[in-house]
Each structure stands twice: as C-alpha cells, then as structure tokens.
Amino acid sequence: MFCIVFLAAYCASKKQFVSKPTKSVVNPDSELLEVNAVAYHTNDSTTLTFLEIKNENLIYKRPDTTNAFYADIRITYKLLNEPNSRRIIDSGSYRINDRASETVQIKSLTSKFSLKAKNNADYYLDIQVFDLNKKIRYAKGLNIYKKNSFTEQNFLITLNDAISFKTHFLRDENVIVKFSNPSITNVTVNCFLKEFGPALPPFSIKTPDEFKYKPDSVFKMDLSTNQFQLTMPKQGFLYVTPNENTVDGVTLYTYDKTFPGVSNSEEMINCTRYLMSKDEFETCKNAEDKKAAIDNFWINIAGSKERAKELLKRYYGRVKEANKYYTSYAQGWKTDRGMIFIVFGHPTNIYKSSKNEIWVYGVETNANALRFVFDKAPNPFSDNDYILERSQFFKDPYYTAVDYWREGRVYSNNSR
C-alpha cells in the first residue's frame, strides 16, 4: 500500500487501454517467442521504438545448397488510439534476415522504427512478429504514454553503450540514462533499499505491511548534458524524478545476475514459502547447509530424487515466468499475480481492463471455476502492480493446490 497524496493524479495520467478477453499470455511453453519493446519519445511528434527478438525459438532454414541457414522474420506495426481500433495513426512493415551456420548461436536480434505520435495523447502500439519459416505469428502490445514529458518513456536506458530492454541491473553496474526534453536540467534520485516479503495467501485477512513513500536516501544531480550516469546499489531500487511537482519518472532495480531465474539455495527456500509450513520454512532458513535442506524438502514431498527433479524444474520454472511478467517494485514471484501463477499455473483465460485483470481457472460456466480479480494499484514506481481481491472462498482451492504439490505432483488447471 502506498501513502502519498498525489497518487491519484499519477493514476489519471497513465491510461492502460482496455483489451478484449484473450487467452493467457503468460508464456505457458518454451515454444513462444520472446519479444521485448522499448518506446522513447524523441520530440513532440516522434517516438522511437526499439525491438528485441530472442532467436532461441526461431526456425532457421537453408534456402539453397549453400551451408548458410537463415531466419526470416517480418515485423508489422500499427499505432492505434486504443486496441482493436480501426483508426490507424501510423503503421509500417519490414523484414529481418539472420544468417547462421549449422549451429545457431543464441542471441538477440534488434531493430528500431519511428512512430508519428503527437504529445497530449496516449496510444496503443500493436506489433506483429511473423516467423516466415515456422509460419507462426506472435503478438506484442505496448502502451505509449505521451500525455506529459516526464514519464519513463521520455528516458532511454543504456548499458555498455547498448539499449537496455530491461530495467533491472547488477549491483555496481553503471547505467546511462538519456533524455531529449530540454526542460530537464536536474533530477532527484530516491534510493529504496527495502526487501519485500512474499505475497499473503489469497484468503488472508491480514493487512499487508504498509509501504510508505519514504526513501532511505535522496540525492540530486544538476545536469549540463542530456544524459546522466547512475551506479546501481547493492539491493533495492532507484526512483528518478525530473520534476518536484510530478511523481512520474524512471525506476531502476538491482537484482541478481540470474534474474529472472533463481540464483541460490537461499532464494530457492524463499520462493518455496508458498508450499511450506512455517516450521519447514524456518528449518530450511536456519539450516547450516541450505542446499541440502531445500533438496531434502523436495525429495521428501516427491518421494524420490527423479520426481523431485521434475518438481523443481516445473516449480522454479513458474517462478522464472512470474519474475518475467509480474515484477513491479518487487520481484514477480513475490506479487499477488506471481503467487497465484506459481501455485495454480496458467489461467484458462485472462480478461484485462484499465482497472483490473480477471484470471479464470476452469470452464467459466462451471460453478467450480475460480475467478481471481487483481486491481491495478496506484504505484509511482511501476505500471505493473496489481493487488488481489482476497476472499475466504479461496481457502479450500488454495490448500487443494498446495496439497497437490506436496503430494509430489505438478498442479495445473488441467490436472484437476
């Protein structure tokens, strides 16, 4: 929960567009293509979009008798005033061909394109990525915020002279933040070092710990150029604001080098809190050999080392997915959506609006179907923070799912 009087104004300045009901977009299998996009407003009427495509699941084919293999990708994009609108403000298309030998090296394919987007409006960017060899289309949507000149899309984050498609970095890394707005002559850097705990159960009546808008330290930087450098702290995040009268700005997080994956035994123990009793958790946390402790926990519930390996792979795979998609000011696995995703698996359907997300598990017309409602939270640090509407109704389904895991089986919507 955030205590800050001008949060309401912040929420009004960022409109999240309403989308039609869709199937789950939480990447339920590794065959999906990872596509990342960053928008950067260069002036009042132009926005640059940088695109990153991970080639891991692209198909490379040899078009002739030469030794070279090629990935063939077509990118199309449409700038709309809202999703599914017939009014196209700007559009374009281009192709990417990537050459490889018989062994394809895992890498990122990057490109950029320019959009005609005027100030004082918000937009929706619909990006379609076609793998022409695989004959599969992938969709990527991006909200474009251009109602004021201080949102995160007015800053371009770079690391080692390259565009960063992430906002999390390693401790002591030097990050360069660029901007084009000439009215920005100084910035305030708020340092938050707090570590956050896991989400409360979906039936909990306990009020979460209040997170007040009070940084651990603050410093200001006077700027003589259109960029500044920040050194990442040991932990926590930096919240940079260019104007004392707004809560808009850019946030940079410090995470371990394995993020969004799990880095060590201690983090494995923390992530498994959703399945553990209090005594089990304390025993693992206080164990001298934490690796042996968490390994023994999984072996005990799985019944054998082989089954434990499969449970480990699936459970921490969900932790990684939660970190990818639900991270806000805390790692994704600690959030309400992350907790539900880890324990219950992929929703059957997700419905999105400007105010909330509704996750449905099971057939909606069935009385036993579960519906989790996540309300968009007023959060100055992240546009990706949602709070679950908790209910005692979820107590039995939650414990059923947890017991399923503790019986050595992977719980999912299809396993009931």
Image (cartoon, grey):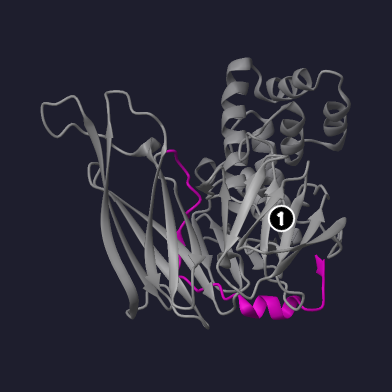
Image spot of residue 167 (x, y percent): 61, 51
Image spot of residue 59 (x, y percent): 28, 37
Judged from the image, the secondary structure of the residue bearing numbered disc 1 is loop
**The magenta stretch spans residue 87:** no
Seen in the picture, residue 398 relative to 390 is either above or below; the reply is: above
Task: Write the residue at 29% across / 66% down.
Answer: 92
Of residues 194 and 332, the one drawn nearer to the viewer in this rendering: 194
Q: For the view shown, which residue lies furthest in the left direction? A: 65
Q: Please, what is the three-letter code of the amino acid marked with disc 1?
A: Tyr
Seen in the picture, residue 374 relative to 119 is either above or below; the reply is: above
Image spot of residue 63 (x, y percent): 14, 34
Seen in the picture, residue 290 relative to 59 is either above or below; the reply is: above
Image spot of residue 410 (x, y percent): 58, 35
Task: Write the residue at 33% across / 77% down.
Answer: 88
Q: For the view shown, which residue lies furthest in the bottom direction? A: 120
Q: Main secondary structure of the magenta part?
A: loop
**Magenta stretch in the rendered image:** 1-30
Number of marks present in the image shown: 1
Task: Write the residue at 63% across / 76% down.
Answer: 183
**The magenta stretch spans residue 21:** yes
Q: Which residue is mark 1?
A: 329
Of residues 31 and 280, the one drawn nearer to the viewer in this rendering: 31
Compared across the picture, whether 278 is left or right of 313 comes to right
Q: Quadrant of residue 285?
A: top right
Task: Write the residue at 55% across / 72% down.
Answer: 16
